[in-house]
């Protein structure tokens, strides 16, 4: 587990979370995982930096704008597809080992060439009439659609050490 759960892998998870517009629950789980592994916990500044530098790429419930159901995210390619976009932007550490024992870069390369990827994306288009790139978007397309971060980290006299809200 020590080769898989690393500081870099935890940061990758924060990046993927931001790209998905994920739940605030991860902000509880990542520090707990880091603590259990004996790694430094991400600080408020780390979360702020990731959420400011990583584009949200997924249009899914409850974040919109079209609110695609989760099954469409899966059919559009799911986590690997989002990670492909993030990798192309240089936002992931591809040297991190995955649970399969392979570096992330190799896993993503296999996914990009996978017949399953093609089949799922075609099925989404055929069955729902939805283009996969309307569910999981490139950074450019996401920006044009107005996708923004789904968490905010206010600081002030009521929360001098910071706080988090789903925005």
Image (spheres, rainbow, N blue to C red):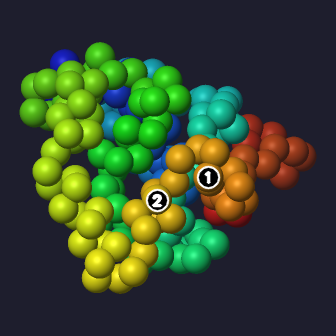
Disc 2: CA contacts within 10 A as few (<14), some (14-19) or many (>=20)? some
Disc 1: CA contacts within 10 A as few (<14), some (14-19) or many (>=20)? some
Residue that carries the numbered disc 2 in the rendered image: 133
Q: Is residue 57 left or right of residue 146?
A: left
Residue 42 on image: x %, y %: 52, 30
Residue 43 on image: x %, y %: 59, 30
Find numbered disc 1 in the image and state the secondary structure of the residue it sits on.
Answer: helix
Q: Quadrant of residue 8?
A: top left
Q: Are marks 1 and 2 in contact (CB under 8 Å)?
A: yes
Residue 67 on image: x %, y %: 54, 77
Residue that carries the numbered disc 1 in the rendered image: 141
Give me the residue at 46% from left, 59% from top. Answer: 133
Nearer the observer, 72 or 151: 72
Q: Is residue 74 above or below residue 142?
A: below
Farthest right residue? 157
Q: Is residue 71 above or below residue 133?
A: below
Residue 59 visible in the picture:
yes
Q: Is residue 92 left or right of residue 144?
A: left
């Amino acid at each position: 587990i020590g080769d898989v759960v690393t500081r870099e892998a935890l940061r990758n998870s924060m990046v993927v979370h931001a790209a998905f517009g994920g739940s605030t629950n991860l902000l509880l789980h990542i520090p707990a995982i880091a603590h259990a592994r004996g790694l430094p916990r991400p600080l408020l500044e780390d979360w702020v930096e990731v959420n400011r530098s990583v584009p949200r790429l997924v249009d899914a419930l409850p974040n919109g704008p079209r609110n695609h159901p989760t099954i469409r995210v899966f059919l559009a390619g799911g986590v690997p597809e989002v990670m492909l976009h993030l990798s192309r932007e240089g936002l992931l550490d591809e040297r991190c080992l995955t649970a399969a024992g392979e570096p992330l870069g190799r896993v993503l390369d296999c996914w990009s060439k996978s017949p399953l990827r093609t089949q799922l994306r075609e099925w989404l288009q055929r069955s729902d009439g939805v283009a996969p790139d309307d569910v999981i978007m490139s950074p450019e397309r996401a920006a044009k659609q107005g996708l923004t971060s789904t968490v905010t980290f206010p600081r002030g006299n009521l929360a001098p050490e910071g706080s988090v809200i789903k925005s």
